[in-house]
Amino acid sequence: MIQFEEFGNFVVKWFRGPLGLGEFREVFYSIGDLRGPGMKDRGVFRYNGFRQFLEEMAPYYRDLNLFIGIGFVKPGHVSDDLAPEYLLYDRLAYDFDCEDDPYKGVEAALFFAGKVREKYGADSVVYVSGFKGAHVTIPLAKPTDWEGYVLSWKALLTLLPREYKSMVDYNMLQYNRVDRAPYTWNVKDGRRAFVRIITPESMKPWMFSWNMYRPLDLSKIVVYKPVLPEVKPKKIIKAGKPSWKWVLKIVDKGLSDGRKRFILYVLTPYIAINSIPEDQGREIIREFIEASCRNRGACSKIYDSWIKAVLRGAIRKKVKPWSLRIMREKDPELYRIVMDTLRQSSTVIPLDNGLKEYHETLLEFIHDTGLGEFGYNDLKKWLENRKGKVSARKWHNWERILRLLAEKGLLGRKYLVNGEWIDYGPGKTSKKPPSKTVKFYLVSNPMLFSHDKTP
């Protein structure tokens, strides 16, 4: 039986990555059934904060679904905006699934790892992921950006025969993808499975080191980009072109309501007219359902039998998906939900949902203490005096809130530089903070804290 301490030591190595550069990564966790109503959260964790978070999760280890971002935040980037240009990647991540015969998925993963080793001299971490197959993680010799990740990810799949290529989950090719961590528990749909590394077979968490695996040198992968003569294109509007990118954004973000209507009138027709194979189409729908639960709290059961029926109906009838214009006419409520979701910049549950509560608490803190300027420790000590120990997750949210309020112009910042406090004021800054020691102060206009937009 693996002890939590052994798992904790392993998973911080997994978080840090093969190059030791992962200071900030996205993490998603769920206590209990992944599709159930239990406690769930997703957000960016700092390495040290992640360690503390793991200690708090110790009592729930056997019920803990844990996913860690495939990419890490670029050093010096302090905003909550996690667009692709702010991420780097130190690993390639694949998922091989075969619902009918899970061993086939494991077989495909091991075959793939062998081909990568044979052609490029790189080792892979292969781990059985639960009920349908296995994951493959390939450490990189140098970090790459999102474009390099996509080109390399696709190029390696050419090593696979058609039978195994059909088992690849293409939903893994998302810039902000979080991937299940080894030596965790896959708790889903009333079932439970232990996720374990099988390369080598006898690997135990306390034995793991990234140094055991030879990294992949991406410069060895040759990607051909044919240069074609420029031809003036005909004006053809077809689903799947840029005007339909919003559909995949909703798949990634999820919806708080109207999931079945979105699947019925938008997603299944979209899959049908783009000739996506039925099994991959079902995976896309499941990804949307999981994202809705993970990011929006919409976790009620949608049965596979219903999904199969509406998808096959859309494929058979070749139904066209609703555009946003048609949706606005036929289902204004769904249109409002979709547009609200698209306006949000990240799949992470937005901080603005609870911003007013943080505002009020911060004003109460300033009123109680009388502090004109305050640091992180001042606020944390006050919170603990009022409410007891502040968990790592809650304090991580507070750190993000303070940075967000400063970027929005509600708080000013002073940094300690060479023994002197330098006032950087409120607002966004494109430069890296000059110091880790910071004090905040309330801006002079208290109306900035008002949520009423009318003058």
Image (cartoon, rainbow, N blue to C red):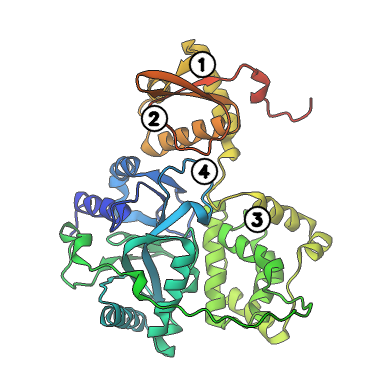
Q: Which mark sits nearer the N-terminus, 2 or 3?
A: 3
Dot 4 falls on a residue whose secondary structure is: loop
What residue is pinned by disc 2?
435
Query: Which-is-in-front pick, marks 3 and 1?
Result: 1
Q: Nearer the viewer, residue 203 or 103?
A: 203
C-alpha distance separating marks 1 and 2: 24 Å
Kindly report the distance in space between the C-alpha atoms of the residues bearing marks 3 and 1.
Answer: 38 Å
Q: Mark 1 near mark 2, Cβ–Cβ under 8 Å?
A: no
In the image, residue 348 lies at what x, y percent?
52, 49
Residue where numbered disc 1 is placed? 366
Is 376 on the left or on the right of 403, as rendered? left
Furthest toward the top, the residue is 370
In this view of the protein, which residue sits in the foreground, 59 or 281?
A: 281
Q: CA distance from mark 1 to mark 4?
A: 25 Å
Asked if disc 1 and disc 4 are in contact, CB closer than 8 Å, the reply is no
Q: Residues within 10 Å of mark 1 (few under 14, many from 20)?
A: some
The disc, 1 or 4, on the residue closer to the chain's N-terminal end is: 4
Left or right of 131 on screen, residue 3: left
Residue behind mark 3: 257
Q: Amino acid at mark 4?
A: Asp
Residue 197 horizontal side relative to residue 148, left or right: left
Name the quadrant of the N terminus.
bottom left
The amino acid beneath tag 2 is Ser
- Which residue is situated farthest in the right direction here? 329
Instruction: State the image quarter where residue 130 is shown.
Output: bottom left
* Mark 3 crowd level (few <14, some 14–19, many ≥20, 10 Å Cα): some
Amino acid carrying mark 1 in the image:
Ile
Looking at marks 4 and 2 on the same chain, the residue that comes earlier in the sequence is marked by: 4
